[in-house]
Amino acid sequence: MEKVLAVAVGGGIGSMLRYGVTVAANLHGGISFPYGTILVNTIGSFLIGMLMMYFESQTQLSPAVKLFIITGIIGGFTTFSTFNMEFLTLIRGNAMSLGVLYGGLNIVGGFICCWIGIVLGELLF
């Protein structure tokens, strides 16, 4: 039960953080191009890469702590399903160039940020 509660509470926190980023992005042009999702996916990718290295070095931490942070907070924060919906909405709305840009920034940006997080995590932990 401890693990389920850790994921649920962490997921709530991550979802609230994602909502905050989306609101902030929409106030600054994020409605016409959904860059809020790019931000949460790339930030989340970076954090999950770095935290993966941290948790490998901190074996004394309980599984509940790892689940709270990775599955809960980061899982609630990132929005891959939202990415797919927005990507297809752009493509289906005949905004092919924006769709390709959006997809590329999420996929390549997320990969690069995760890789940087792993490298930085290896150096720090």
Image (cartoon, helix red, strand yellow):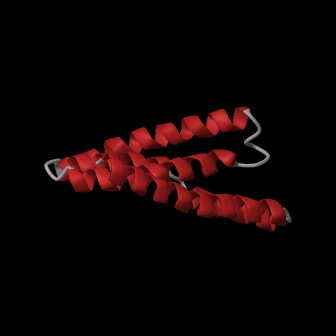
84 and 52: which is toward the camera: 52
Looking at the image, residue 39 lies above or below residue 25? below
* Residue drawn at point x = 25 percent, y = 56 percent: 56
Q: Which residue is drawn at 41% across and 38% down?
A: 13
Decide if residue 1 is in sight here: no
31 left or right, relative to 73: right
**Nearest the camera: 123 or 29?**
123
Q: Residue furthest front?
A: 123
Name, please, the residue furthest toward the right: 94
Which residue corresponds to the image point at 83% horizontal and 63% vertical from the top-left?
A: 97
Q: Nearer the viewer, residue 106 or 81?
A: 106
Q: Where is residue 66 in the image (x, y as percent from the top left)?
A: 26, 50
Give left or right: position of 19 versus 117.
right
Relative to 124, is 96 above or below? below
Q: Is residue 78 left or right of residue 101?
A: left
Picture quadrant where residue 14 is located: top left
Residue at the left extreme?
Answer: 60
Residue at 47% x, 51% y is 46
Mark count: 0
Residue 65: image location, x then y, percent: 23, 46
Q: Is residue 14 visible?
A: yes
